[in-house]
Amino acid sequence: MGLLSKRALSIKQFQLNSKIFACPICKQQMNMSDEGKMSCPSNHTFDVAKQGYLYMLNRPVQSMYGKELFESRHKVIHAGIYDKVQKAIAGEIIQQNSVILDTGCGEGSHLHRICEQLDGAVGIGIDISKEGIMAAAKFYNEQLWCVGDLANSPYNEQSFDAILNILSPANYEEFKRLLKPGGKVIKIVPQENYLMELRKQAFADSEKESYTNAQTVERFKTAFAHVEVKRITYTVPLEVDLVQNLLEMTPMGWHIEEKESIQLREITIDLDLLIGME
């Protein structure tokens, strides 16, 4: 018997974890068939794509993020620039066999690398961008990937031990619905020196050279009964061939007309790790 295809492997993974899924149309429990159809009792059905992901939007959505952005992000993350951030996140998830949801997961590298550090973790990534989820399914077989909308997420309540929200918009009410008792929401937001070397070259003497996320942090504190804030800051060398990838993956780089003029030998990562519990 030959090796299972990517789609067949994903179907088995979805079957093992089908109790997590709720129909985004009618909210009933869903089940995965051997043929790769995720369906509810009302026969709303979503098929596993040949690449191994589930498309669970019930309306078309236009994303501003393209294939090139996700390929660049994959290269930058795999160069190890965010290793300390991923290690810090993994250190907050102490349960064995945790079920983890990454919201706005993009091409999945953060979730994959965090799960690698945890025993028996089940990782599920959701993003509204089909291009991002297609890339995640291409790169990683071990996690489950869904095209979906957090405003109408395809998951049952109290399904996750940890919910990650890494440099991405949040939906706190939905996070709290999905979180198991005692679970954690872990959000990453930029601090004032995040990518400062790029900011200084691209936006010198403008208001974009510096910024603050104080309002985002305060909203997080308001949303959860128990909150910790931990700052992660360090500077790492940046290979020359990664500079253009960094510009491609960050919205900061999209507005730079002469990208070839940007020269970076190192880059600063300066982030707040927000941990929320009910």
Image (cartoon, rainbow, N blue to C red):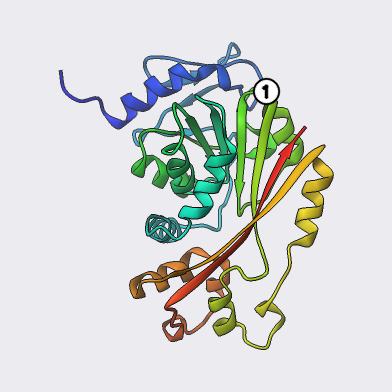
Residue most toward the top?
A: 41
Point out residue 117 in the picture as x, y percentages from the top left corner: 44, 38
In which quarter of the view is residue 207 placed?
Answer: bottom right
Q: Answer left or right for 225 relative to 144.
A: right
Q: Nearer the viewer, residue 54 or 180?
A: 180
As shown in the figure, which amino acid type bears the numbered disc 1? Gln
Q: Nearer the viewer, residue 20 or 79?
A: 79
The number of numbered badges drawn on the structure is 1
Judging from the image, what secondary structure is the residue with disc 1 in? loop
Q: Residue at x 64, y 33 (%)?
A: 153
Q: Quadrant of residue 210?
A: bottom right
Q: Which residue is mark 1?
A: 158
- Is residue 274 visible in this depiction of the protein? yes
196 is higher (above) or lower (below) than 69: below
| Circle 1 Cα neighbour tier, 10 Å, few/some/many (<14 / 14–19 / ≥20) | some
**Residue 169: % across, % down:** 67, 51
Residue found at the far left of this picture: 1
| Vertical order, 226 against 23 (above or below) | below
Q: Position of residue 278 (x, y in %)?
A: 77, 32
Residue 127 visible to an observer of this rendering: no
Left-right relation of 123 to 172: left
Q: The N terminus is located in which quarter?
A: top left
Residue drawn at (46%, 54%) of the image = 83
> Which residue is found at the position 49% from the left and 72% from the top?
267
- Residue at position x 81%, y 42% from top? 223
Choose between 172 and 146: the one closer to the eye: 172
Residue 129 image offset from top left, x and y in percent: 52, 48
Q: Nearer the viewer, residue 90 or 165?
A: 90
